[in-house]
Image (cartoon, rainbow, N blue to C red):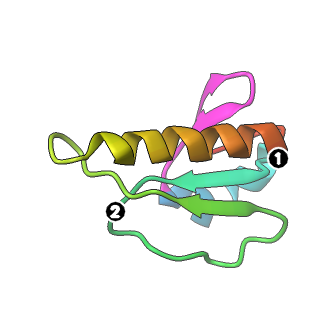
Amino acid sequence: MIQLAGDLWVGSRDDVKDGEYTRASIGGILNVAPDLRGYYGWPAIEYAQVGLVDGPGNEVSDYCAAVLELGALIRRHERVL
């Protein structure tokens, strides 16, 4: 995982599988992968998903949805992945 700003982290599914998110005290996860669906039952974690594709092909509304969801998670949790 990489810390972008004080409370915002970027990582992969492997970081979550390895439990890295618990060591960083992550309270919310925003999944932007279009092909990794579902909540995996992480304890005490708020999970949201807005699928985006790499490169061209996303609608402006998809980007807006991701930004709005990220903002909501940041307001509710100290640290977000």
Task: Using the image as rendered, state which of residue 42 and residue 63 is in the foreground.
Answer: 63
Q: Which residues are magenta?
A: 1-12
As for residue 42 lying within the magenta part, the answer is no
> Residue drawn 74% across and 30% down?
7
Three-letter amino acid code at the position of disc 2: Pro
Secondary structure beneath dot 2 equals loop
Q: Quadrant of residue 37?
A: bottom left
46 relative to 56, above or below: below
Residue found at x 82% / y 45%: 76
Quadrant of the rendering where the N terminus is positioned: top right
Q: Is residue 29 above or below residue 61?
A: below
**Name of the residue lying farthest toward the front:** 61
Q: Pointer 2: what residue?
A: 34
Which residue occupies the extreme left position in the image?
56
Which residue lies at the image location 65% right of the left edge and 37% below the top edge?
A: 71
As drawn, the label of residue 70 is none
Which residue carries the number 1 mark?
A: 25
From the viewer's perspective, is the residue at label 2 or at label 1 nearer? Answer: 2
Task: Report how far apart the C-alphas of labels 2 and 1 lie in the structure.
Answer: 25 Å
For the question of whether residue 1 can be seen, the reply is no
At label 1, which amino acid type do we have?
Ser
Query: Residue 23 location in percent, x, y?
Result: 79, 48
Furthest residue in direction top, as rendered: 5
Residue sitting at 18 percent across and 40 percent down? 55
